[in-house]
């Protein structure tokens, strides 16, 4: 088994075979998630809408509520289709928060309470940042740290991290994942999310 794995890695290095974004010595240890999904935002960027398209393509049961609260999640658990996975999409948009009439402090508090409730209910939390470095503060207006604040609020508390590899060019997400022992799934481009989410939810 070890020799086969080494052969696959060597082949991937010369472009003969594509390895999954998350590689583990034991395939049974690869991260898994269940549906239905509650999809929300931390920062009101367009990221959740992008993920919504992927979930639809995979025919995965989900609900998009960009302003979901802990109370919303708790009420869902008493329904016929209780939430099994919470996806919180990190990425701050000053325009999006302005349109919603909320501040970054409001978002951080809402998502902190939401994640606490998810953990209480035994719901898996996926922290996603899929818009790359352009959404990170390095590409934002001078002095704007709101995107980094969404990462601080969500990433270390997640059970799985799902990111655009380019957005980790400074190793920010890798460091968080290693420090908290969180499985990290990184994609080269957003179309790869179809494959990786398919694997994650058992559709591949």
Image (spheres, rainbow, N blue to C red):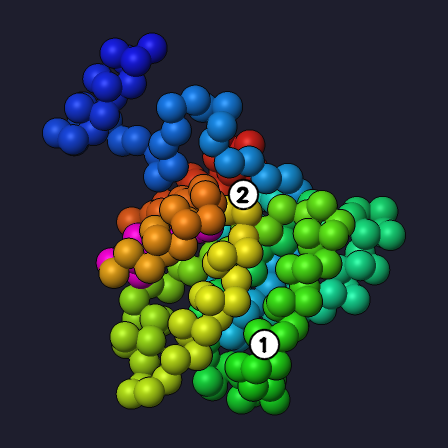
Q: Is residue 151 above or below residue 35?
A: below
Lateral position of residue 203 relative to residue 143, left or right? right
Q: For the residue carrying disc 1, how many other residues have a C-alpha within 10 Å: few (<14), some (14-19), or many (20+)?
A: many
Residue 137 appears in which quarter of the rendering? Answer: bottom left
Question: In the rendered image, which residue does mark 2 sit on?
Answer: 58
Residue 59, image x and y in percent? 59, 43
The residue at 74%/65% (across/down) is: 70
Q: Depth check: 108 or 128 in front?
A: 108
Front disc: 1 or 2:
1
Residue 171, image x and y in percent? 28, 56
Tell me where the magenta segment starts and ends, as one range.
Answer: 161-169
Q: Depth check: 98 or 158 in front?
A: 158
Residue 124, image x and y in percent? 63, 46
Lateral position of residue 201 relative to residue 76, left or right? left
Compute the Cα span from label 1 to label 2: 29 Å
Quadrant where the image shows the N terminus: top left
Q: How many numbered discs, if any?
A: 2
Residue 65, image x and y in percent? 66, 66
Q: Is residue 37 visible?
A: no
Lateral position of residue 58 relative to residue 138, left or right? right
Lateral position of residue 4 relative to residue 34, left or right? left
Q: Is residue 60 above or below residue 16?
A: below
Q: Is residue 74 above or below residue 192?
A: below
Residue 65 painted magenta? no
Residue 168 painted magenta? yes
In the picture as drawn, the residue positioned furthest to the front comes out as: 179
Query: Do the residues bearing badges 1 and 2 touch, measured as CB atoms within 8 Å?
Result: no
Q: Is residue 38 above or below residue 148?
A: above
The residue at 48%/58% (across/down) is: 155
Sequence-first disc among 1 and 2:
2
Question: In the rendered image, which residue does mark 1 sit on?
Answer: 107
């Amino acid at each position: 088994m070890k020799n086969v794995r080494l052969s696959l890695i060597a082949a991937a290095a010369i472009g003969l075979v594509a390895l999954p974004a998350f590689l583990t010595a034991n395939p049974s240890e690869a991260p898994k998630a269940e549906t239905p999904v509650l999809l929300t935002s931390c920062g009101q960027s367009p990221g959740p809408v992008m993920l919504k398209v992927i979930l639809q393509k995979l025919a995965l049961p989900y609900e998009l509520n960009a302003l979901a609260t802990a109370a919303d999640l708790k009420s869902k658990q008493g329904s016929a289709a209780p939430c099994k996975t919470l996806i919180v999409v990190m990425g701050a948009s000053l325009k999006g928060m302005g349109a919603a009439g909320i501040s970054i402090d409001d978002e951080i508090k809402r998502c902190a309470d939401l994640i606490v409730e998810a953990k209480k209910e035994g719901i898996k939390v996926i922290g996603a940042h899929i818009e790359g470095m352009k959404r990170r503060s390095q590409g934002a207006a001078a002095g704007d740290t709101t995107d980094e604040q969404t990462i601080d609020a969500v990433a270390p508390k997640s059970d799985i991290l799902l990111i655009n590899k380019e957005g980790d060019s400074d190793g920010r997400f890798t460091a968080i994942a290693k420090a908290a022992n969180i499985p990290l799934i990184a994609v080269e481009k957003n179309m790869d999310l179809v494959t990786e989410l398919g694997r994650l939810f058992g559709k591949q």
